Image (spheres, rainbow, N blue to C red):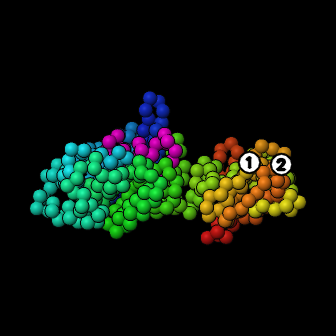
Amino acid sequence: MTFLVLHQLQTSRGGKIILNNVSLQVDEGEFIAILGPSGCGKTTLLRTLAGLETADHGQIYLQQQEISQLPPSGRQLAMVFQSYALFPHLTIRENLLFGPRARGEDRKQFASRLQEVAGLLELEPLLDRRPGELSGGQQQRVALGRAIIARRKLCLMDEPLSNLDARLRQTMRREIRQLQQSLGLTMLYVTHDQSEAMSMADRIVLMNNGCMEQCGTPAELYQQPASMFVANFIGSPPMNLFPLTAIPPQQRYLPSAETAADVVLGLRAESLTLTSPAHGRVQATLISHEFMGSDTRILCRLAGGSEVVTVKMEGLRHFEPGTPVGLAWDDQAEYRFHRHSGQRILSGPAGLPDQRFHALS
């Protein structure tokens, strides 16, 4: 059932378009990650939904009711800010109950609601402390608790983990996802970290210059990128992208109605294999390698050009810089993009219908 609808939201500031005709439908209980680089419009989208900013055009519907003109207090949603927005002079108990008290809700339920949330987030020993006495992870739990105690079905989160170290971020990702699923919350989660979006979300909205570049499941964005921007943003390392003219003519498999100069070839690092120079589809020179724990990433420069590609191989590998190598890959591993528009060309080798995603599914 469609729970939330954003319809053609448009926002400009000083002549610059911040949100460009953004439309989205969200089902009840769905976790949506809004992903993108700094300045792409993702936080503006969240703040517009919360009522903290107003769109020039467009409508927002929550449970079939238009809320575009309502103030934040009338939108029946909860929000967790990047800064946590805790009151430093109040105890954790008072911080958690601040919202229900300010809204004049039934005080008889405060004790049970506090007990429920404190137990859920393991905050019982901290209730009489103040935010300054808590670690970053504990403060994050309190901010999340304030959203949960409000008992809103829609929760907005604006880069809530960006102030935490890498290990704690991983722990909090799992906790937030588990809470969202167990409570049945509909959640919109803004992040610039693709690993957060890929590991947590049911669907990802990838933003670029105020536009929705692509919306889909993490697997869809990784396996079926709609553009070079998506291919370069999703995946670690990003997809290798280089001109089709960088490989020999007999290896190009031109899509119909395209010339080699118009096409950019895309290959995931794990789709490439190192061979001897004589057995590769292209020749290259090894530049360097990086051991990442579970895999080794090898950087190679294509022969006769400046293009650098990354090859990912399992386990620890050792290579000598300057070694001539060959690069091999399967036809079905190829992606093709139009050089000017950046959009993906939906045809496989020799212009045949693309069967790649049937093979990967």
The quadrant of the image that shows the C terminus is: bottom right
Residues 97 and 329: in front is 97
- Outermost residue on the top side: it is 14
The quadrant of the image that shows the N terminus is: bottom left
Percent coordinates x, y for residue 61 in the rendering: 34, 53
**N-terminal of the two: label 1 or label 2?**
2
Percent coordinates x, y for residue 4 in the rendering: 37, 56
Percent coordinates x, y for residue 231 in the rendering: 62, 53
The amino acid pointed to by label 2 is Ala
In this rendering, position of residue 81 left or right of residue 330: left
The amino acid pointed to by label 1 is Val
In this view, 333 is above or below 266: below
Q: SS for tag 2?
A: loop
In this rendering, position of residue 236 left or right of residue 4: right
Q: Quadrant of residue 316?
A: bottom right
Q: Which residue is mark 2?
A: 303
Q: Which mark is residue 99?
A: none
Q: Which residue is mark 1?
A: 308
Report how far apart the C-alphas of labels 1 and 2 lie in the structure: 10 Å
Which residues are the magenta region?
32-53
Identity of the residue drawn at 52% across and 54% down: 194
Residue 148 visible in the shown view: yes
In this view, 291 is above or below 56: below
